[in-house]
Amino acid sequence: MGRWGVGIWPALTLSSPSAGTLRPVRRSFYDPASAPGKGVVWEWENDGGSWTPYDMEVAITLQHAFEKQQPWIDLTPIGFCYIIDFGTMSQINRQTQRKRRVRHRLDLVYPLVAGALPKAQSWPASPGPASSPPGPPCSCPQCLLVMSVKAAAGANGGLLPPLVIRKSGPPPAGTRLLPPPGTGLKPLDGAGLRGPGKTAASQASRRQASGVPALTSSASQASPPGAAGKNGRVALATLNRTNLQRLAIAQSRVLIASGVPTVPVKNLNGSSPVNPALAGITGILMSAAGLPVCLTRPPKLVLHPPPVSKSEIKSIPGVSNTSRKTTKKQAKKGKTPEEVLKKYLQKVRHPPDEDCTICMERLAAPSGYKGPQPTVKPDLVGKLSKCGHIYHLHCLVAMYNNGNKDGSLQCPTCKTIYGVKTGTQPPGKMEYHLIPHSLPGHPDCKTIRIIYNIPPGIQGPEHPNPGKSFTARGFPRHCYLPDSEKGRKVLKLLLVAWDRRLIFAVGTSSTTGESDTVIWNEVHHKTEFGSNLTGHGYPDANYLDNVLAELAAQGIAEDSAALEKD
């Protein structure tokens, strides 16, 4: 992969030896009935006239609405300010009303593998028995397993497909069947398995009568080369339920670590008869047939709460209004940097024998700053009144001039803030209200929903590239807090941070690498409502305490909320 390398063990990572960066990598598996499962790709036309694919989550949403024959769909609930009109096949920006063309086409079924593209007429319009592809793209057992599982899952409505084992008659007399490695089972003869007075066939028929998926044996194209003539029955009668559960858990961990694809099983731990014991039996039998598999229940990402009507949205007790806007604040006029710093410094006549941590020169020597020269003499030294750290006045004035110039100063050593710190957040709107749903981990209270909306614009003199445009991706952004005493306290401090323009900034996104875009500014928010798959959701017992500490690092504490208007 050129400058990048992918690590498999102990975790999937993407590393760049030259840059020294390390990023996590993950794999996703999708329902065979969804857009990626069917090979449907949704794209929008960019300014260059070429087509750009939508994110997988958006494509799944579009395909689901399209198959339901909806005339249009609003993408606001999933974090995008667009409306897709299926009649005109166009994307409409809700803010600017700009239209772009959209299209959908048939591609390779996810995960994308090498091979010929499927023909449009071979794609079923509705879930049904899937036909075999004209030629398998790969003959390895793993790819064959993925294709067979997708085909069978489409035919069974997404449920676990029946186990299929190649069978070509009974084995010759004296043949001994070997169980999968690591199971601890002893080889058996070709007579098969019998429990205490009951045959495997009678047990299978009893499971079918009670609604449990049967494990059948028939010819299969998904069997790996050389599997013909092998019987897939193994010794399970010697294992009780507890041992089967342990075996299933151990096998799942090994398979996941080795990169084997997972097969979703619904109601694995629910009231359904499909339980961990049966899952373990299925995994063992499929391993005996030479098919690697891991049975699991994939987690679901829940970004937004259930729909809420306007009458259900309430204001937050103790917090006035339900929204707040910000505009660009001008720097305080009439005070020079020297006058600002004079409030926070004490002159030092006899500097200690230490280095100035800004210019790294001795405090007894003149400042080593080589930039634009302030009017302060380079040999003057001052001590900050709260923390007591000592610097060249020349260096402090230069640092202030390179910052926001808002009348505040932050010690470069201990980060103590002097004055009121403000940021460079672009103009926008912050909305906040109560919704009648509870967050995971907070079942006894409602939820505070915060909606941030910042439009794209032109960078000001306080931004990295003044005069250049900046983008604003993913707005409006929805965030959530529990409606508890501490949750309301966090909200009030977030309102102070918003007024001081400290929630967002303009910079380079650590997620996409895009520069000149609106990014979060070191105050973490929870953007997942009903899950915590990305680490930005609930339950998280330490989140409220952590965000209070992050706000305190920006100079925002309880006394700050008292000084600001609600």
Image (cartoon, grey):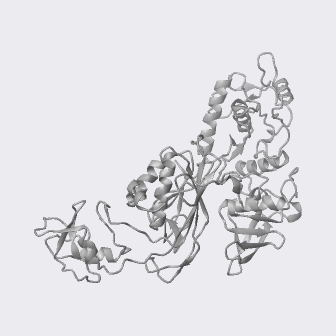
Front-most of residues 450 and 492: 492
Q: Is residue 154 visible?
A: yes
Left or right placement of residue 1 versus residue 294 in this view: left
Q: Quadrant of residue 367?
A: bottom left
Point out residue 495 in the picture as x, y percentages from the top left corner.
Answer: 49, 61
- The answer to whether any part of residue 521 appears in the image is no
Q: Position of residue 203 (x, y in %)?
A: 82, 24
Image point 80% across, 60% down: which residue?
65
Residue appearing at x 48%, y 59% in the figure: 494
Q: Between residues 364 and 167, which one lies in front from this camera angle?
A: 364
When the figure is inspected, residue 531 is found, relative to residue 333, above or below; the finding is above
**Looking at this view, is 262 or 564 the one in front?**
564
Q: Quadrant of residue 72?
A: bottom right
Relative to residue 168, is residue 329 depicted above or below?
below
Q: How many marks?
A: 0
* Residue 232 x %, y %: 77, 34
Q: Does residue 410 appear left or right of residue 53 in this picture?
A: left
Give the side of residue 550 with respect to residue 487, left or right.
left
* Residue at x 86% of width, y 52% of height: 127
- In the displayed image of the protein, which residue is found farthest to the left? 350
The residue under the point 88% across, 51% down is 128
